[in-house]
Image: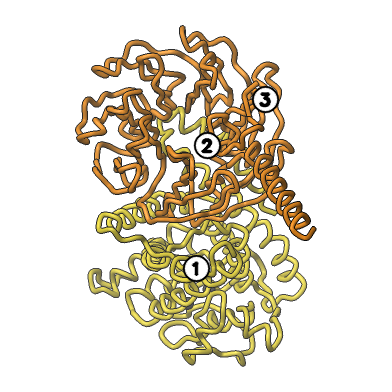
Amino acid sequence: MRWMTLSLVLFSVILFSLASTAARAQGLAFVIDSGAAAISVVDVASAREIRRVPVLREPHHMALTPDHRFLLIGDTAGNELIFLDPVSGGVARRIPMPDPYQLQFSPDGKTLVVTELARNRVDIYDAGSYHLRFRLALGSFPSHINFSPDSKTAFVTLQQSNQLVAIATGSGDVRWKIDIGDTPAGVLWLDGRVLVAVMGRDGLAVVNPANGAIERRVATGRGAHNLFLSPDGRTLYVANRVDGTIAVLDPKTLVVQREISLPGGPDDLDFAPDGKLWVTRRFAHSVAVLDPASGKYEIIEVGRSPHGIWLNTHDHLPRAVAGAPAGHS
Amino acid sequence: MSDPLDTIAGWIAEHAAIPLLWHLGLMQWEDLAYGWALFAVYGAVQVALMYAICLPLERFFPIEHWPDHRVEWTDMFYTILARVGILPLFTFVLFFRVQAAFSGLLADHDLVAPTLERAIPALFGHPVPTFILYALILDFADYWRHRLSHRFRWWYALHALHHAQRQMTFWSDDRNHLLDDLIAALWFGVIALAIGVAPLQFPVLVLVLRFLESLSHANTRLSFGWLGDRLLISPRFHRAHHAIRAAGAKSCNYGAVFPFWDMLFGTADFTATPGMTGDPKADEALASGSYLAQQWAGLRGFLHALGVMEHSQ
Ligand SMILES: [Zn+2]
Ligand SMILES: [Zn+2]
């Protein structure tokens, strides 16, 4: 009898913890408040900030480790890399790292590239050990990063040098470096081309990854800052910082189909399971939850100067408990 | 308090600073532009707060009465320049560069730039005690900077500009020679690098401290009482530092925010009756000249003290 009670209790405890893990695994957004030295943890379902994780100084961007165990957060002025549990939002570990601004893992999960914007270095680390392989001085204000699908080349924008550089991840050699226009920011590999958002101008540059030739330019709006491909691959979104718009493009033709007004300095975005875009608004201490179909959005207040954003609702995450898939609509 | 101010700063960044940078081809500085907007907005609030609180104090509980207030306009200009204007922008760009270079140099040797929170992990995530500790250290450094600026002839030649004002009001806190400001910025810069200061992290608290510094110059009888005067520097305490007999090398009450350092190092005077201020030995241009005339007179005194320039009448 006692055994039965005990196992019942145990069973319900396990069930309960599974259920709560599942619930949380479905629904947290991590927003980096770069001007508040904190990470806002937002409950996706209720669209409310539930907790603020303090960090040392000035965090900007994050990357999920290839094994999905940690969300890495770079604290630039704090010179730290913070390991966050992507399910609970708890801080697991912190290691010293100089000026980590943008950080991104290669598609094969073997290389981590980190840009040190303030002191003009591009660092190539071993993804598993965080051992520094190369520290490269390539130009001024290295910023956004993207990779070729074979992971052999990293593309980095140099915001003050007005250049795009292609780096061989294996050797640290520069494959090519080109002038691309005033203050290049976001960079994205798309269908065999490299797209760069040129913030000092009004749109994208389309670059041939083999030789760095600029093939064409596409106007999206003043201050084109960053670009994102939807999870289904059918839509390309460009955040235009100066115009305060999100341009909606056909990724095949790069034709601008619509422009959605989103004031407040739109910056990074992520995709929620219901198809909405969660966009950080740098100058409005908030996140906009934008319905791209209607152009309407709701506001979630967070800390000062929110920059990077990531939702733990993506269905490829193994941490999502079986039987309760997140799924995209 | 911070949210509406952040909103205003954001509005300025979005609708004025960022479009301007875009047109000038300087978008790489957009993050700094927002920082400056924040600084300027909090500075404007400091000035408004000073005005709202100090003006009635000076009107209803004054120590001195003056026939006209023309010489205060220059002090007002100093205040706007220092708290809302160009100076913070300059300091920002410079400090941003120096801090990045310093932490980078350390990182190249596998070291991490020091911060108080790393030295005392218990502070982590507790902004108020963290800030108070930072404020105490910086205030201690400022005590010694100020005390030394009275000690050396060349340095006091610059600092005399601050003391020359005979109509000392809450506007007088920022009247300093640009070279003196530069020395102070370098002094703070070194300390800030050593303890890893993050001023934008605590804008409301910085606002309160700057307000106290302005208040301490106000022309008012206000004191904080026996105990209060020994915890925070009051107008009564700082007026003794500006007294005519305290100008130059034999002064007292060098502190800016906390009186502890004066008490600890034997320079505190809580007994002086509040009276007139000024430096009778200072060039008249330092007292009543225009902004540029004051700067020029300060530079002349500085070069003369160094023996570079002959005294000309
Ligand atoms: Zn003095
Ligand atoms: Zn003073």
| Three-letter amino acid code of the residue under disc 1 | Pro
Decide if residue A120 is in sight here: yes
Q: Quadrant of the C terminus of chain A?
A: top right
Circles 2 and 1 on the same subunit: yes
> Does residue A66 appear to the left or right of A122 in the view shown?
right
**Mark 3 is on which residue type?**
Asp
Closest to the camera, between mark 2 and mark 1, is 1
Instruction: Determine which residue is flagged by label 3.
Output: A274
For marks 3 and 1, give the one nearer the viewer: 3
Q: Secondary structure at mark 1?
A: helix
Comparing B143 with A132, the one in front is A132
Q: Residue at x 25, y 69 (%)?
A: B309
Residue at figure coordinates x 46%, y 74% from the top left: B142
Q: Write down the residue under mark 1.
A: B121
Position of residue A33 measured from the top left corner of the image (x, y, whole percent): 56, 46
Viewer-side label of 2, 3 = 3
Binning the other alpha carbons within 10 Å of mark 3 as few (below 14), some (14 to 19) or many (20 upward) gives few
Whether label 2 touches label 1, CB < 8 Å: no
Which quarter of the figure has residue A184? Answer: top left
Chain A visual colour: orange
Q: Which residue is mark 2?
A: B17
Q: Output the chain of dot 2.
A: B
Q: How many other residues sit within 10 Å of disc 1, few (<14), some (14-19) or many (≥20)?
A: few
Q: Quadrant of residue A154?
A: top left
Report whether B216 appears left or right of B190. Answer: right
Q: CA distance from mark 3 to mark 1?
A: 41 Å
Q: Is residue A249 above or below residue B200?
A: above
Q: Are marks 2 and 3 on the same chain?
A: no
Return the mark for residue A296: none
Q: Chain of mark 3?
A: A
